[in-house]
Amino acid sequence: MNGHTNARLKLAAALSLFVALAAAWAAAHANASAQNSQAQANAAQEARPAPQGQAGQPTQQQPPQENPLVAELRKRIAGQEDKPAEEVFKNIQVLKGVPAGRLLSIMERGYTRSLGVRCDFCHVVGEWDKDDKEMKQAARDMVRMNAVINAELKKIKAIEADNPVVNCGTCHRGQPKPGGDRPRPAQTPADKPLQ
């Protein structure tokens, strides 16, 4: 009887892993579909004539303004942007080896936009190395989880050619809490008719 229990537990664990990977794969393809739609929309936007200012002169679009907290940190690390993050900042645990300047970009463009939050969601502003906020550890855990999922995705032969990758935005979609209750893109692989 103990052998049957162990076999069932192994089967349950394997099924759980399969379901998690299948969900990640579906989310990655849905995300890719949404990005493709966005890229097409961006291309259409770029194809339109530039807005005209005074005297028919084209107006220039301003790039998104950098978060003032990140801008301040960039000033502080000036000249050290290419050093590994752990040599420039204190208490770096999961993004070791990432250049310090790139770490700031990851925080601002990656986490902030993917989760729709500000720096103070995970950090104590001005005391960046503190671990006082629970969300900071959650983010570290999710970085590790993301690495495992991406490593597992590469092992799936059927999707190998697509080079599947998941990131924070795959599940969070601009919300602090990830979940399947978010609106789906207009058409995902599950929505397409069988041929």
Image (cartoon, rainbow, N blue to C red):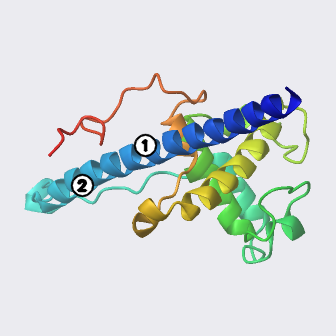
Image vertical order of residue 178 relative to residue 81, above or below: above
Q: Quadrant of the N terminus?
A: top right
Q: Is residue 83 left or right of residue 130?
A: left
Label 1 – label 2 distance at C-alpha: 24 Å
Which residue is identified by label 1? 26
What amino acid is found at the position of numbered circle 2 in the picture? Answer: Asn
Asked where in the image residue 184 lies, by quadrant, the reply is top left
Q: Circle 1 sits in a helix, a strand or a loop, which is it?
A: helix
Q: Circle 2 sits in a helix, a strand or a loop, which is it?
A: helix
Asked where in the image residue 189 lies, by quadrant, the reply is top left
x%, y% of residue 188? 30, 40
- Res. 42 mark: 2
Image vertical order of residue 142 relative to residue 156, above or below: above
Residue 123 visible within the image: no
Q: Residue at x 89, y 48 (%)?
A: 129
Q: Is residue 59 left or right of residue 161?
A: left
Counting every numbered tag in the picture gives 2
Front in this rendered view, residue 97 or 132: 97
x%, y% of residue 83? 79, 76
Q: Residue furthest front?
A: 1
Front in this rendered view, residue 97 or 16: 16
Q: Residue at x 71, y 32 (%)?
A: 121
What amino acid is found at the position of numbered circle 1 in the picture? Answer: Ala
Closer to the observer: label 1 or label 2? 1
Front in this rendered view, residue 93 or 5: 5
x%, y% of residue 63? 41, 57
x%, y% of residue 123? 79, 39
Q: Residue at x 12, y 55 (%)?
A: 52
Residue 130 visible within the image: yes
Q: Residue at x 76, y 32 (%)?
A: 9
Label 2 Cα neighbours within 10 Å, binned few <14 / some 14-19 / many ≥20: few
Sequence order check, earlier mark of 1 and 2: 1
